[in-house]
Image (cartoon, rainbow, N blue to C red):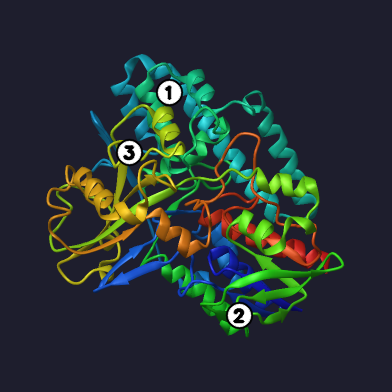
Amino acid sequence: MKAIVIGSGVSGLTAAALLARDGHQVTVCEQFGQIGGVTATLWEEGFGWDLGPLMLEGIGPGEPAGEVLAEVGAAQRVRLERGERGICFPDFRILPPAEYGGPYWRREWLKRQFPAEQEGLDRYYRFYDQMMGLAALSHQAERADGLRAFLLKARLWLAFLQVMRMKNWNAAQVMDHFFRDPKLKAIYTVILADFVVPPSIFPGLLIPLVNPETAFDKRIPTRLSPSVTGKRPAFHYVLGGCGKLVEALAEVVRQHGGEIRTGTRVQKITIADGRVTGVRLEDGRDEPAELVVASGGAHEAFFGLVGREYLPADFSARVADVPFMESVLMVHLGIDFDPTPYQPIPLCYYYNTYDVEGGIERCRRGEYHEGKDGFLIYIPSLHSPDMAPPGHHAVTVYTIAPNHLSEGTWTQRRDEMADKLLAEAGKVIPGLGERAQVRVILTPQDFRVRTLQEHHSFGGVAPVLGRSGAPHRTPIRGLWFVGSQSESNAGVANSIVGAWRAVRMIRKGM
């Protein structure tokens, strides 16, 4: 078939690569001048910075997205390195210790910091192991066929029974169940700021999955013991930048006869008799196709490119209900000094408040904290020296930010807000802003242009209890939807796996 893929982020490129390998005639239409969406690498004056994915989960060998990359023929084109992150609060820091303390060293460290919470920590980590086992079983079951799939699903159901009573709990309820100290609760819920979802509406069962111990120490093995089901998640950096992953997928598309067009904006998905017929480009040309795979913004795809008149009311309502994250303010720097005396590892989160609920709610209301609530610092040149000139380092400082400021616009206040964010980061790495030789600012407005989204949702679908992303299968025959705003949920790994799921459904429907 002739297939058109709208968008060249990792989901669009994964779908395009799978379809091209299946023998279809594939064209990828990308409205921006560079492929990759937000999974791209920006270069200027010899410095390279990722636009956001940073440390990726699930893309290694034997992991969900890693298996898709291997299947499509892209895995061998990408070099990976295990990563880890630190977290710092006003009165303590949790960084990988010089001497490895085993897979549960954080639990023991926390027991010393919060002696009254020892019993709760033991209970939490039993719950943690249960959820890790469930995630591993789920992955195995999805990949299995026949009797093996049936047996794995039976095991999955039995394992889920152990935590079923918590299925409708939010993150705040789960934390209250295990802990009393608000600071200890914050250690496990501050990561929700990445999603801009407060603990009161975040699915509680996901708390262990967004706080895997392997994220905090790359020495922790992914398979702990024969009695533990499956592999634990691992986190990796893409050596040379996430753009290498994008390039690897694009190479597969082209190798199998596919075409990728940048600067090509789709104005409309054309439909006749309930079936997709192709797309109309911004220049007025019609491109016929029997299959269209749209990625990117759910509202933009269905309400803009398709039109509500082609969609059943219940489907439109579901798309309208997709919960979105907020955006980010990102400042990329090229510096001429060694930052490791202040931050010894490439990625560290700095939190200046324990009021997770309040801080996130304020951002959702459009109030920008100017870096005072927290930020992260990422130094990609520590794992990929070629991302900076010799003797220099590439540094990214970023934090969540509302799409629209309550006072003024991002265009008007970009330099002011970047200066304020760097002033906070300068308390961690002195001279960071003043000694920068190169500075590149990306505001929510810049990301809206890059992604062609009215509301830029940095990670995609916000994980909110009872709500989900837009379905892969649509009411229009021949039209499919993939990406971080789809039912496969947010993030790079989920976008890759979601594209694989959609193509698997396409294959079954042929």
Distance in Å between CA atoms under marks 2 and 3: 42 Å
- Marked residue nearer the N-terminal end (2 or 3): 2
- Of 323 and 1, nearer the camera is 323
Q: Circle 1 is placed at which residue position?
A: 121
Q: What amino acid is found at the position of numbered circle 3 in the picture?
A: His
Q: Position of residue 373 (x, y in %)?
A: 31, 36
Tell me the element at label 1.
Answer: helix
- Marked residue nearer the N-terminal end (1 or 3): 1
Crowd around label 2: few <14 · some 14–19 · many ≥20 (10 Å):
few
Tell me the element at label 2.
Answer: loop
The residue lying at 43 percent from left, 71 percent from top is: 244
Q: Circle 3 is placed at which residue position?
A: 369
Q: Position of residue 441 (x, y in %)?
A: 30, 59
Q: Position of residue 262 (x, y in %)?
A: 52, 78
User: What is the total number of numbered labels drawn onto the structure image?
Assistant: 3
The answer to whether residue 196 shows anywhere in this view is yes
Q: Circle 2 is placed at which residue position?
A: 283
Above or below — where is 161 with respect to 403? above
Q: What amino acid is found at the position of numbered circle 1 in the picture?
A: Leu
- Of 456 and 198, nearer the camera is 456
Q: What amino acid is found at the position of numbered circle 2 in the picture?
A: Asp
- Of 298 and 390, nearer the camera is 298
Distance in Å between CA atoms under marks 2 and 1: 60 Å
Crowd around label 3: few <14 · some 14–19 · many ≥20 (10 Å):
some
Q: Nearer the viewer, mark 1 or mark 3?
A: 3
Tell which residue pokes out farthest to the right in this image.
273
Q: Nearer the viewer, mark 2 or mark 3?
A: 2
Q: Position of residue 89 (x, y in %)?
A: 28, 33
